[in-house]
Image (cartoon, helix red, strand yellow):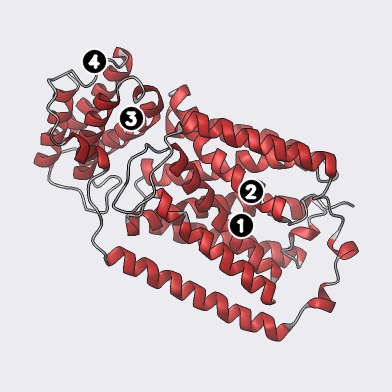
Amino acid sequence: MLNKVPEVTVWFWVIKVLCTTVGESFADWINMKLGVGLVNTAWIFTAVFVVVLGVQLRLKRYVPFPYWLTVVVVSVTGTLYTDILTDQLNVPLWISSAVFSVLLAAVFGVWWARERTLSIHSVTTLPRESFYWLAVLVTFALGTATGDWTLELTGWSPGVSVLLPLGLIAAITLLWKFGANPVLSFWLAYILTRPLGANIGDWLASPKVAQSPGDPTGLDLGTFTTSLIFLGLILATVVYLTVTRSDVTETHEATHTAAATSDPRKERVALAGFGLLAVATASLLVWAHNQPHVGPAPETDNTSAVQMAPGQAVKKFPPAKVAALKTLASTSLKDARSGNATGAHAAAQSLRDLWDADQASLQPLDQTGWTSIDAQMDKVLKTFGIDHPNPPMSPAQQQKELNTLLTDMG
């Protein structure tokens, strides 16, 4: 039986990063356009994932289009699951990272106990392919959690944060070239492509303003344009692979002689190298976490001297969108006043989600107005400890910033 997974070539890694990037930006765009919220968006993509996975599992061999379509959808779905834990259930990112790490270890453990191999070159049966896609789903959720946790710890912008997973993937590649276990090397790199692709997508879509001194600025392409560009690149690559069949491989046993090339001594040395790499990465994150983080987002700095009359900042925005934002802000304020801290936090979280979803449509209408509201929105979120490392502030401070936001929106 032919292998159901493509050969791991440069093309594999290129299109994997493309899929991860478009998964991040496309999910944001769908969430914005449909306006159904994070949870409902996750349900939609879960249903799509079930359908495309069903098609993929029915195939008898690797076919580029359905395979990579499944990767795109699973990248979105795994990301959304982590976002729900973080944004809707307020689960700390370090807990999500730990839970998904344990879950991935359990998937690999059961997979190994049943099949005695974790190699993607041997995905030739339905059980092996089922384990493979389950592992891929968990790697995307884990990559999302660890990537976001890194940003939370360090305060790095997406542009700077691209360098960490990129450097780690390069180091893993060198260790693999030296003689590291290829299966371990593959899965470590596979997890890291998720934060790499997501940060690239965020960097491309973010505004052309520096997040902090010395940081690369975004390209301000927006989520829709970024999605179109990367979907086009994915389609072009898949067409090329379909025509050339350069990534088609037969069974591992038919094309490889691992026993003849494996060197146990080099594998042990490389394993120690992975350990040193993990220690070095942890040390870097601890160091970055202890450095003074550049505080407010650029929009706060840009609008600190701009005084706008109540309602002026949202004058060019659609009234229905402004009304929806004001409703959530009012709900959060009401709950904060009544002592319902959980309800106030949940409403503020929904306010953040809706504001982020509307960015691509509102910002082009009035850059100054959007920036002004965004700056005040950031102050509100800071009082709740949302998207900020600080703990929630007092209800009085939350009410003050919410009142200011409602005044700004007229």
Q: Amino acid at mark 4?
A: Lys
* Residue at the spot 47% in from the left edge and 61% down from the top edge: 164
Which numbered marker is on residue 21? none
Kindly state the secondary structure of the residue where label 1 is placed. helix
Q: Earlier in the sequence, mark 1 or mark 2?
A: 2
The answer to whether residue 180 is visible is: no
Kindly state the secondary structure of the residue where label 3 is placed. helix
The answer to whether residue 349 is visible is: yes
Q: CA distance from mark 4 to mark 1?
A: 46 Å
Q: Earlier in the sequence, mark 1 or mark 3?
A: 1
Q: Amino acid at mark 1?
A: Tyr
Q: Amino acid at mark 2?
A: Lys
Where is residue 398? Give x, y as percent: 15, 39
* Residue at the spot 57% in from the left edge and 57% down from the top edge: 191
Q: CA distance from mark 4 to mark 2?
A: 42 Å
- Residue under circle 4? 315
